[in-house]
Amino acid sequence: MAFHNDLGNKGEQLALNFLVDAGYTILEKNYRYLKAEVDIIAQKNEVLAAIEVKTRTSSYFGNPEEFVNPKKVKLLTLAIDNYVTENDLDVEVRFDIIAIITNKKQTKIEHLENAFLHF
């Protein structure tokens, strides 16, 4: 498997552990709808969080969250709308990013709630 795939899988596992420790219930991992994929769908209380995980080994080329573009936001919105409809849910939906920088020296995890408000 390519290095970036290994890094992505490691980041998603770190994010899952982080969310569970923070009291979230994990509902789906890698939920797909058409061309969209939501890395993690989790719930805490009455809030459904669609979470994009971005993992990098450094911030040299920018912070991980800076790599979520408007096209990705549109696809995530489409996918989570389908998930809510498909499961007949009545919840508040929030879009989050979990930005991870991990390397041999350290691992830094940042949970950005309502991350797509600026798009």
Image (cartoon, rainbow, N blue to C red):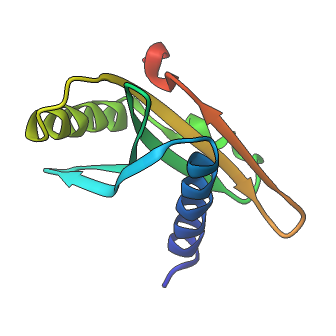
In the figure, 103 relative to 97: above or below? Answer: below
The x and y percentages for residue 89 are 18, 31
Residue farthest top in this picture: 118
Above or below, 49 against 108 in this view is: above
Q: Position of residue 50 (x, y in %)?
A: 38, 37
Q: Residue at x 56, y 64 (%)?
A: 13
Quadrant location of residue 99?
Answer: top right
Which residue is rendered at x = 52% and y = 68% of the image? 9
Front residue (pair 108, 60): 108
Q: Quadrant of residue 57?
A: bottom right
Indicate whether 117 appears above or below 10.
Answer: above
Q: Nearer the viewer, residue 19 or 69?
A: 19
Residue ID at (11%, 33%): 88
Image quarter of the C terminus: top left
- Percent across and percent down for residue 40 are 41, 49
Q: Residue furthest right?
A: 105
User: Residue at 18% across / 34% down in the picture?
Assistant: 84
Q: Between residues 71 and 34, which one lies in front from this camera angle? A: 34
All told, the count of numbered labels is 0
In the image, taking residue 38 as reference, residue 97 lies left or right, namely right
Horizontal relation, residue 113 to residue 105: left or right: left
